[in-house]
Image: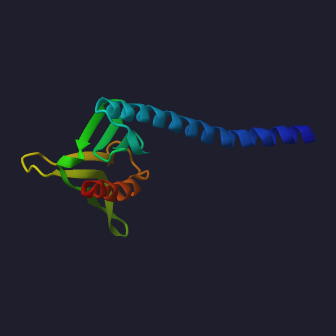
Amino acid sequence: MELGTSIMGLFAIALFVLPVVILSKSRKNKEKELLVGLNAMASSSNNDIGIADYGMEFAIGLSKSKTHVFFYKKSKTQEIRTTILLDQVQKCVPELTKRKIRTKNGTESVIDKIELLFFFKDKSLNVKRLELFNSDEYSQINGEIELIEKWTPLINGSLAA
């Protein structure tokens, strides 16, 4: 009887632990794939990645020399590769696009997009947007606000250097 209880207990534990392990492994594999894309971009411009962070389907990196920002986004439908030369950038600004929705308790703000905007010294160049989050793709924010709070001063600090 104790053997049966022990087996059931182990089965229950495995049932709860297995999804966590699978999700963790899947996330690590996705990060490796994104890092490969980021490194390929860096090596094509004779750079190495110094700092990198990952989102759901994107990676952002700063070259060791702090002269380039690399952004690689890969989803099921598209692949985006963006390299930004920091000596051409005037400033980097975070942007949260919000909309109001009605609830039982009034109105609430909902974030639709989270982006990093790059304004160039040459005014004839358009603002470059790096989209970290879009509510059309994902329903929940997963650390993107923290990433823009980290990367905005990091990039702007590299502009001053």
Of all residues, the one furthest to the bottom in this rendering is 105
Of all residues, the one furthest to the left in this rendering is 124
As drawn, 13 above or below 34: below
Q: Please give the name of the residue rendered at 12% of the width and 46% of the height, measured from the top-left corner.
A: 126
Q: Please give the name of the residue rendered at 13% of the width and 52% of the height, measured from the top-left corner.
A: 121
As drawn, 105 above or below 126: below
Q: Nearer the viewer, residue 32 or 18?
A: 32
Q: Quadrant of the C terminus?
A: bottom left
| Residue 75 visible | no
Left or right of 92 in this view: 104: right
Could you tell me residue 52's position as x and y percent? Answer: 41, 45
| Residue 72 visible | yes
Q: Quadrant of the N terminus?
A: top right
Q: Please give the name of the residue rendered at 25% of the width and 58% of the height, measured from the top-left corner.
A: 160
Q: Nearer the viewer, residue 108 or 113?
A: 113
The image quadrant that residue 25 belongs to is top right
Of all residues, the one furthest to the right in this rendering is 1
The image quadrant that residue 65 belongs to is top left
As drawn, 129 above or below 98: above
The colour scheme is: rainbow
Could you tell me residue 37's position as x and y percent? Answer: 38, 31
Could you tell me residue 46's position as x and y percent? Answer: 31, 33
